[in-house]
Image (cartoon, rainbow, N blue to C red):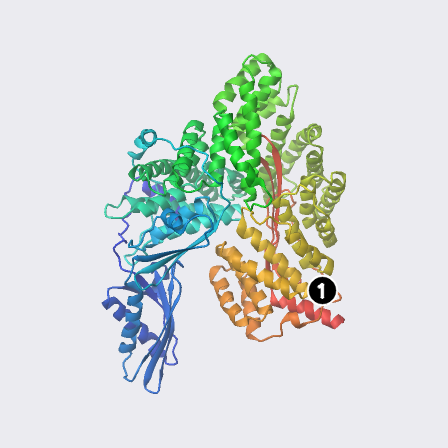
Amino acid sequence: MTHLFRFLLMALGLALMAVPTTSSASPSISIAPFESPDQGDSLTFPRKLRQSLRNKGLECVFNSTSNERARYSLNGVVERSGGNVSYSAMFSDTFNIEPDLFFKGKQKGGESLSPAAEKLASSILSMLEEPTVGVVDVRGNNHLTAEEIASLAGIKTGETADVGRIIAARMILKESGLFNSVRLHLEPGEQGKKLCINVDEYPLVTGNPVNPVKTEKLQRLLGESSKLRLPSFRIAPPSVNATCISGMHAFNAEKLMTELELASDDQAKVEILERIITTAEALRYQILSPDQETISEQIVLLGLCSTLTPSVVNRLEGYFRRQLQQAGTAEEVDRVVNLTGLFDRSVGIAARIQEILGSRLYLEAPDSPTSPWVLQKLGDLAATRGDADRAELLYKAAAGSSQLPVAVPLLISLAESRYRNLHQESGDSILEALDPMLSPKIALSVEDKARITDLSYLSELCSEVVDTPEDADFAALLSKGHALISLKRPDMAEPLFHKLHGMHPSDARPFTGFARLAFQRSGQFYAARSYIQKAATLENRDRPFYELALGCALDRVVNEALPAIEKTGRPSEQAAAALYLLPRALSFAEGYRTFSPAKASILESGLTVFKDWLSYPSMPSDEAFASLCKSATEMRSVYPLSSECAASALFSSIFAPAPEASRKAAMVSLPGNAGQNLKLLRLNTLMRSMNMAPDNEQATTLAAVIQTLAPGYSDRGRSLSAQADGLALAGIHLKDAAMLDRAKSLYKYAADNLEAGEKSRILNNYAVVLSLTGKEDEADDIFNESIDLSPACLKTVESNQLYIHGSRVSPLTVDNATEVYPPQTVETNTIPLGGTSCNAFEGNFAVMNEQAEFKPEYDEFGRLNLLFKYEAFPWLSFELITLQNDHASEKD
């Protein structure tokens, strides 16, 4: 059992460990040994520097002790020449809030290094001794004034420029819905620090269509919550040394929120959520300290707790089931069970903390520019709990109290809550204001445009509920019941379905309603199984039945059967149980054909191949992959307008034994209604095919496909990185400097939107492209940063760095290849119905670290979606690029 669960047990009987106060601590600096021709000077100079800094009231540690305990880091070079001592030093901020500063100085004469150390210490102190904000500089704004943005950030001139306040400001600006991107950093100034705010504005709705809510009404609503004590997550916060970084917990909170958003696999999400809970407890304890200035910490904790939602945890339910299936010891089972319990408890605790902190922050300063953000967080919490009345009031208050233009996402949430409260007219008035946002000329995110489109459907559902009387016939009441479920009104839907069951006890359709309600409450397919099993024996099975029944069946295959078979092999009890499940699943797919022939065909094909793969004598995996690819390709021609068929064909081609299958699948045009996810799937499939067997046609198509991606895609960092990868691969093959220049710009922009491992990959590729365009010195520094960020594919990055140090000829100087390097195939051992990572393989230009995933998703409107996701994740490699060009030259 890990230390996390030992903490859980200890917390039941022990008081929380004390966390020293850091707000009054002086800035702490980690000092590295200085490089020097004289080994003695290399160690002596940092010691004298440390003493000089301590004499000036600064805390110092050597980075061999703990680099994480210091706010700043210092390293450099010291050398003697002609009786003088000179030094060069780089002073860096661990949180990247302040820019790196370069200090250079000289000591004339003298044997001791003390004067030089004293001079450098004085320079550092002069940079640190003005901790207040002297100037606020706002850039990038077009519609909002600089004063409005600075006011929303909540930092004024004359205030302390501490880490917590900066991070809280950045969090509010990022989550306000008013900006695509936000950057905040400090610079040295003549009269204190200069706070630089750089923004990229999101599309704005002109005019505020919402009237304010009376403050007295909100005070009555929130007053009781504000009086409650903050609950504990029941784990001990980490103990902290007195020289710890002031603002460390706030910095970790923001970093973890970004990492969770970018995490591409369930295991990474679980690890991040564990750290989120620990950090949230540390912030909670810090807020309780009586001598702390806690407004910033409260804002950060409120934002951090908003990530611990039921939907996030519910999405991991399949992962935990797979972990239990694969657990080999009682300790492993115990860990999964404890972890599941920790997350379940933490969701409720995080919600209570949000409610208490949000109420306090608003009531203490109702006219604060941050109040709309706080009220929106409280509205989101109420909507998650299904309290439509409270959510509508809080959203309305958030929109009406803002002196700024109302953010599009907030207006969408308000309209949703009004429709769910059956206030169709007021919902339609907001929809009218939002309708211009659907214009192709407006770079709204794909996610927000989809939500606006769904508002029209919510309006129709609302109208249906309002217009259907209680004494209507069975069919009309049934439709009304499903509309109420889609509107998230289980309080009205459940009694109606009980009434319908009483009217026709032998009818399957009321049981389908009960199944949908059970799924909506829990977010889990297994909660609906008993109702589906009952409905399957009755008559009048409709589309909602087949949608949910197939979701349940696919969930069992993906999250139960496949993990068990992977562990025990095909000749096992689990395989036999899966075989028993498949005939019913196939019968559901056959019934579904009446309502959705394209989607039903995909499911029938996949389930049939899975059945053949399991049956005795079993089908070889390569043959199963080939069969899937062939049937998916045929369906794509039968249903050319189906996005699902196009996605299935692209996804299955990845696993096909013949590399040519991927090429053919990726080169076919997509349906006109293709969404962003399908476009990204094709782009990644094309990159994989291009890397395995490049040719000019694929390279040209790759460059054209990149132009089809929407610029306002919600997952901006991943979209930009995929476009950059495609341009780099095409540009390398075509020897096109313009493409590489575009890739270089996109890589730089994407790196600012990503964190940790994925940022490491982007920086590696960025450095390769820099080298190919003649900027090897700049690339060397980028390679170092990539290595520092993540050990993933470390060998590739180090090999690339050695390449530029060897002054090899740039591959761009080699003539175009007339024949391609022999393609290499990828070996896969699992069938494509499982969420899995493909094995990393080396191709012509890059090491590919692929990830492929298929899962069923049942949305809030009762629709079954088949999600096919594949990402290529190429790591550009000089060695492979050179091999390809050398091979082409030999052929020439």
- Say which residue appears at 26% left-offset and 57% top-offset: 25
Q: Is residue 859 left or right of residue 331?
A: right
Q: Position of residue 665 (x, y in %)?
A: 72, 49
- Among all residues in the image, which is located at the extreme bottom? 82
Quarter where residue 58 is shown = bottom left
Secondary element type, mark 1: loop
- 802 up-or-down from 188: above or below: below
Q: Position of residue 871 (x, y in %)?
A: 60, 51
Camera-side residue: 540 or 553? 540
Examine the rendering and report whether any part of residue 825 can be seen. Answer: no
Which residue lies under the disc numbered 1? 821
Q: Position of residue 150 (x, y in %)?
A: 37, 50
Examine the rendering and report whether any part of residue 547 can be seen. Answer: yes
- 23 up-or-down from 393: above or below: below
Quarter where residue 698 is shown = bottom right
For the C terminus, give its image quadrant.
bottom right
Q: Amino acid at mark 1?
A: Tyr
- 199 up-or-down from 364: above or below: below
Camera-side residue: 198 or 168? 198
- Say which residue appears at 46% left-offset and 45% top-offset: 178
Badge 1 local density, few (<14 within 10 Å), some, or many (20+)? many
Q: How many marks?
A: 1
Q: Position of residue 742 (x, y in %)?
A: 60, 61
- 384 up-or-down from 618: above or below: above
